[in-house]
Amino acid sequence: MVHCAGLAPGVDNLLTILECLTATTRAHSQERFDGTQYGALKKAVADVVTGRLTDIQGRYHEIVDDQAQLAKLLTHGADRARAIAAPKLAQAYRACALRAGLLTLRAPYRYVQTRSSRKRIGAGQLP
């Protein structure tokens, strides 16, 4: 029997799943299932989960079956992601001394002290 006062973890989990999928409260669940058999609660949760998954599968098949619309959605999403990521990616490239698009490291610089000044030279250059 389901007794809502001191809930076993399994009962609490089932009630939480049911409440999330049906947008009901614990008070409503307690009123509905207090004193009923555990099997009735499991069946109610299974019915709700099955119904929700059927809706999700139906929507999935609608999207996947329309290849032109799917390609359009994916392209739109990629364009949005690129626009959002571009400023941060450019900042990361600058921070890591990378050249955007080339993914090559800039030559490291070192400083050479001459008699009159300090001179910055790139790798491969002789002092």
Image (cartoon, rainbow, N blue to C red):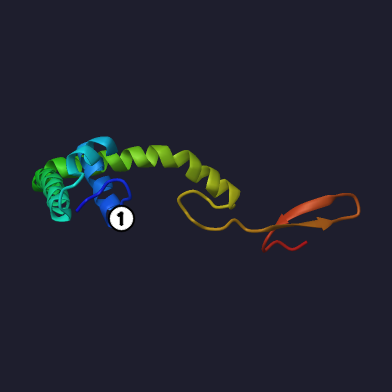
Q: Foreground residue, 66 or 111?
A: 66
Direction right: furthest residue: 115
Number of numbered discs visible in the structure rendering: 1
Residue under the image location 31 percent in, 46 percent down: 5
Quadrant of res 126: bottom right
User: Looking at the image, can residue 25 be seen?
Assistant: no
- Viewed as shown, does residue 116 lie left or right of 36? right
Residue under the image location 78 percent in, 61 percent down: 127
Q: Foreground residue, 5 or 43?
A: 5
Q: Which residue is mark 1?
A: 8
Residue under the image location 24 percent in, 44 percent down: 74
Residue under the image location 9 percent in, 43 percent down: 62
User: Looking at the image, can residue 37 be seen?
Assistant: yes
Query: Under tag 1, what secondary structure?
Result: loop
> Three-letter amino acid code at disc 1?
Ala
Rendered location of residue 98, percent (x, y): 55, 52
Badge 1 local density, few (<14 within 10 Å), some, or many (20+)? few
- Viewed as shown, does residue 3 lie left or right of 106? left
Rendered location of residue 14, percent (x, y): 24, 51
Rendered location of residue 72, percent (x, y): 19, 40
Q: Is residue 39 above or below residue 31?
A: below
- Viewed as shown, does residue 12 lie left or right of 1? right
Rendered location of residue 55, percent (x, y): 12, 43
